[in-house]
Amino acid sequence: MLAACRDFFAVRDVLEVETPILSRAGATDPNIQSLRLADDSGPARFLNTSPEFAMKRLIAAGAGDIFQIARAFREGERGRLHNPEFSLLEWYRGGFAIVDLMKEVAALLGVLLKRPEVAEQAVFLSYGALFEEHLNLNPHAADVKALLRCLDDSQVAIPQGENDKDVLLDLIMSSVLLPALDAERLCFIYDYPISQAALAKAHPQNPRLARRFEAIMGGMELANGFEELDDPLEQRARFESDRRRRAETGAPQMPIDEFLLAALAQGLGECSGVAVGLDRVLMLAINASHIDEVLSFPVTRC
C-alpha cells in the first residue's frame, strides 16, 4: 500500500517530503489533544497530531506540490478506530479547489483498495443536504434544543449537560448519519460549518460554511481535506478562538505556531490539502473490524 501511494504521486510529479515529529506548538483544536514530551531542558515539545503546519511552511518556501507518509499522535484516542499513534498520508496541491482534491482522493482510494469502481461510483453530498436527506433537519439553522431532540429521538446517549452545538452535531454525524450511509460506496461530505474547520477557507458565497470535506466509507472517516486558509490574521483569530474554547472546557492550553503564521504572511498561495488515515484504508482493504488487526504494535503491545 505504501508503494502504491508513492507510485500514485510519482506519476503526478508530487514531491515526497519529511518534517519533524516534535514541535514547540501543539494543536489548538479543542477536540484534539497533543501528547507532550516531558523535558526540563527547554521549551515544551509536542508530538505532532498532523504534519500540516510544517508542510505548509515548506509550501510557503516554494516546495510546490508535496506529500508525506507520517506518524501522528493524539492523546486519549483509543478504540475500534483509534490508536494513539497512527499513520497519515497528507498532501497539498497548488491551484486545486476542494472538488479537484476530492476527485484525486477518490482516485487514490480506488488504487489502494484495488477497486477502480470506488472512484467511479463516489457520492458527493453537502453537509446540509446530508442532514436534510436523512433527518429533515437544517444543521446550520437548528438550535441546541433541536439537536438534543434529534439525538433523543434517535436513542443516542447524550453526555450530561452537553450544550455545545458543534459537539452535538458531531454526535449526530457519528452516531446517526455515518451508519446510515451505504458502507460499500465512497461518500464525500463537503461544506462543513465554519466553526468545525479552523484551518479552511470560508465559502465564498456563505461565510457560515467552510471549504472542508470528509471522505467516508465503511462507516469510517478516511480523509479530511480543506481549501487552505492563507490569511495569517484570520488564522491567528481562529487559533485564539480555539484557545478560548479550550479554556472554557478546562483543556490544556497549546502554544500558537508562530512559524506557521509567519509562513502564511510570506504567502501560501491557492492550494488544497488532505490527510488520509492509512490504517483505516487498510482496515477496509482486508475487511477488518478493529484497528488492532492492521497494526503490528497497537498501544497495548508497545
Image: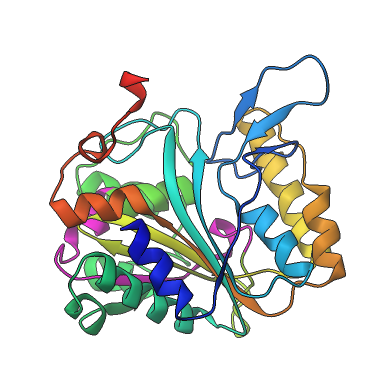
Question: Which quadrant of the structure image shows residue 77?
Answer: top left
In magenta stretch: residue 127: no
Q: Is residue 199 left or right of residue 100?
A: right
Residue name at image x 37 percent, y 34 percent: 83
- Residue 46 visible at all: yes
- Residue 250 in view in this figure: no
Specify start and end residues of the magenta stretch as a single range. 175-199
Q: How many marks?
A: 0
**Figure coloring:** rainbow
Q: Residue at 77% x, 68% y: name it.
A: 60
Across and down, in percent, residue 11 comes to: 44, 80
Where residue 69 appears, as percent x and y from the top left, is 48, 54
Of the pair 109 and 148, the residue shown nearer to us: 109
> Going 78% across and 14% down the picture, which residue do you hit?
40
Query: Where residue 277 sits in the image (x, y, percent)?
Result: 38, 53
Image quadrant where one finds the C terminus: top left
- Depth check: give the residue in front, 169 or 230: 230
* Residue 260 screen position, x and y as percent: 77, 55
In the drawing, does residue 225 fall left or right of residue 121? right
Q: Is residue 191 left or right of residue 59?
A: left
Q: Quadrant of the N terminus?
A: bottom left
Q: Tell which residue pokes out farthest to the top in this image.
A: 40
Residue in the image at 62% along x and 40% along y: 21
Q: Is residue 244 above or below residue 119?
A: above
